[in-house]
Image (spheres, rainbow, N blue to C red):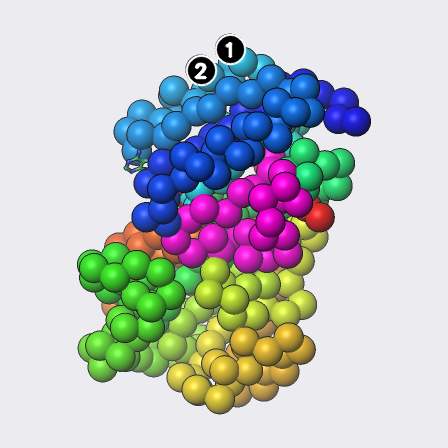
Amino acid sequence: MTEFSRVLMVVNPISGGREKSGLLEEVKEILETRGLESHTFFTSGEGDKQALQQEIASFDPQRIISMGGDGTIKLIAEILQDNSIPVGVFPAGSANGLAENLDLPTEVPALVDVCLGNKFIDLDTIIINGELCLHISDIGLNAALIKNYHEGNIRGKLGYLIQSIPTLIQSDFPFQFEIEINGKTISRKAVLIAIANAKKYGTGANINPNGRFDDGKFEILIFKEFNIPQILETFKENVELNEDFLEIIPGVEAKIRSYKNIPFQIDGEYRGDIKEVVARIAPVKMKIAVP
Ligand SMILES: Nc1ncnc2c1ncn2[C@@H]1O[C@H](COP(=O)(O)OP(=O)(O)OP(=O)(O)O)[C@@H](O)[C@H]1O
């Protein structure tokens, strides 16, 4: 028996390039069978923050289900600003970076069970250059790949794969960085530096094997070389990465500087070529339903 009655579905109708009316009907039917009242809010891509804020204020949901990609979860997090309303995640985006880390079931009824269940994590959130980050942000080669992916025509993992070769040829890595963390300033040459709340990228690559997204910290991941065997290692269940490839520094506040403008991304969205990244753990946590 669920101890609440109002469920708000927040649906991005275009996420992942997938039509989802059938999926939505299936979920709504399950909610109805359980005697739950549901509303559906469709994002439009414009003015969503204000419109969703109004919907939450008027419907007063006790549970929210996000049906979209990381951008949709982020929209909800920006509005909630605390962990009072638990959020269930229905992965329906192009990469689903956060969901990849939650070990969610794939069958619809089982996923609805998780979204409505009583097991939660208090997800840390990071503010990076003034923007909320739930999952992973990075500067360097991966962000260059995301930039080229968004400029290309092919979506999904194949699109990333197709963009990887021109990205590698065009990019003049390694880049020179200066990193301020835990009261120290260090210099490093790296192909990319990530600020990670989670363990895995949306592609499934396990780049931060000891990371936890509810420990009040993030990890700075310094990838020092482009090493294909080590990259392939990140797709294994028990990852062993050597220090010549990856250096990991946990922290709550950090500044990363590059001597020239290089691509930067937050949660899979390219955010321009920049020279400085400032990150700090935010006081706000997000309550996410997990299996
Ligand atoms: N109805 C809509 N039409 C166009 N864009 C929309 C719509 N609803 C939301 N968006 C945009 O979709 C983005 C969020 O997408 P989301 O992360 O949910 O899915 P995604 O498939 O992973 O996205 P992307 O393919 O951009 O990575 C935001 O930029 C938002 O403004």
The picture places residue 168, in percent across and down from the top left corner, at 28, 79
Q: In the depicted view, which residue is nearer to us: 136 or 11?
A: 11
Q: Residue 183 versus residue 130: which sits nearer the camera?
A: 130
Q: Nearer the viewer, residue 42 or 54?
A: 42
- Badge 1: residue crowd in 10 Å (few <14, some 14–19, many ≥20): few
Residue nearest the observer in this picture, 49 or 271: 49
Q: Is mark 2 within 8 Å of ligand 1?
A: no
| Quadrant assignment for ligand 1 | top left
Whether residue 282 is visible: no
Q: Position of residue 242 (x, y in %)?
A: 58, 86
Q: Quadrant of residue 20?
A: top left
- Asked if the residues shown at circle 1 and circle 2 are in contact, with their CB atoms under 8 angstroms apart, the answer is yes
Q: Residues within 10 Å of mark 2 (few under 14, many from 20)?
A: few
The residue shown at (53%, 34%) is 26
Which residues are the magenta region?
87-112
Disc number placed over residue 58 in the picture, else none: 1
- Tell me: residue 178, above or below residue 29: below
- 160 versus 267 height, above or below: below
Mark 1 residue type: Ser
